[in-house]
Amino acid sequence: MRLTALKLKNFRSYENITLTPPEGITVIAGENGAGKTNLLEAVHLCCLGRSHRTNTDADMIRAGADTGGVQLTVERRDGTHDTGVRLFQTQRRKKICYVNGKIAHRIGELMGHATCVIFSPEDLGLVQEGPNVRRRYLDMLLSQLQPAYFFALQQYTTALRQRNALLKQPDSAEVQSQLDIWDEQLAQTAAPLVRLRAQMSERLSGMAATHYAAISGRPEETLRIRYVTQLGDPEPAEQALRLLRERRRDDFRRLSTGVGPHRDDLSLTLSGVSMQAYASQGQARTAALSMKLAAFDLLTAEQGEPPLLLLDDVLSELDPARRRRLIDRIRGAQALLTCTDVSDLNGASPQCVLQVANGAVSERTTAAL
């Protein structure tokens, strides 16, 4: 997959720009706050229909503008794919997604046309923060691999929202009857999520372990990823329904649903020891990078071509040896890489360096790198 054009109009710090990056590594250099990450965010938005930085669409619109938009063009083995998103300042209007010039009536229709894997300093949260960060990592990967997964996740989320709303009402025969209906729907929609997450986690574990050993230079440290769920039964729908009914009284007390894939997690261990509890900063950063590289490998294997790689100020966080090993792992893919100090790029051999300043982007020579 090759990104051939990225257009931004009234998006974050940019009024109106078009980028046409070459194959290989494109470096985006600039001071902190210059707008480097905004360009990666625009790519991510066109691939997944959402930002990796905010849940509020209005945050992405340039100050003073009523609307903003981004458009992405990629060349794939089966031809050209165009995706785009238009954002609105007012909450009364939802964002509009476009696929090949036509309005996509659901965000899920955007999935799979252009795919990406993003690396950022916030990825430490994969190891150090709560289960929701690790679930989101799985959900974003599976949604790009299988758009049907995204639709199943939407159905589950809708059913969960309805059930939680009922749990906040006074208990009555009518509420109990409605809960019976939503329990059935929640259990049925939970089953495919649990199965696919478990299968994906098993595949990710071996790939991430290989990357961890290569980047860390410590083959004696073994990374393992394991999916942790309450629904490990061969028939998760039946188990989910039983547990939902058994624990309904507890759910009424807590005013929320305590069983289901929205409570699941990924267990990360290094040589058998919990990383969430004991990993150093360096180990956590290497594990997070390894998980993202494993996602890159899976997308490449399933699509038959690599996704776009977005690296947001990642090299500065690594020591020279790990930096060199990471660069070696990503050669051959098209990557957009941000940095503040070009000295961090030693060995990267970029095809293009873009300088960002004052809402403008200009190309600079790579001869000195």
Image (cartoon, helix red, strand yellow):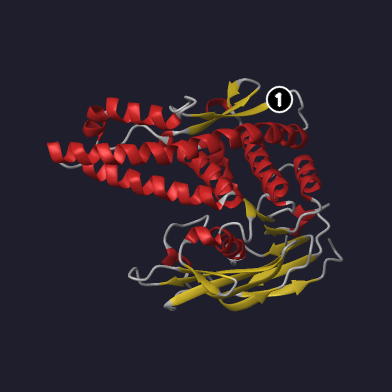
Residue 236: image location, x then y, percent: 44, 30
Residue 160: image location, x then y, percent: 34, 43
Q: Which residue lies at the image location 69% right of the left edge and 54% below the top edge?
A: 307
Q: In the picture, residue 216 is in which quadrant?
A: top right
> Residue 23 versus residue 84: which sits nearer the camera?
84
Q: Which residue lies at the image location 55% right of the left edge and 39% below the top edge?
A: 126
Judge left or right: residue 126 versus residue 330: left
Q: How many marks?
A: 1
The quarter of the picture where the N terminus appears is: bottom right
Label 1: element kind: loop
Judge left or right: residue 242 versus residue 54: left
> Residue 309 versus residue 163: which sits nearer the camera?
163
When the figure is inspected, residue 231 is found, relative to residue 173, above or below; the finding is above
Q: Which residue lies at the image location 78% right of the left edge and 45% below the top edge?
A: 329
Residue to which mark 1 is pinned: 221
Residue 116 appears in the picture as rendered: yes
- Dot 1 crowding, Cα within 10 Å, few <14, some 14–19, many 20+: some
> Residue 205 versus residue 76: which sits nearer the camera?
76
Residue 170: image location, x then y, percent: 13, 39
Residue 261: image location, x then y, percent: 43, 36
The quarter of the picture where the C terminus appears is: bottom right
Q: Which residue type carries mark 1?
A: Glu
Judge left or right: residue 318 versus residue 250: right
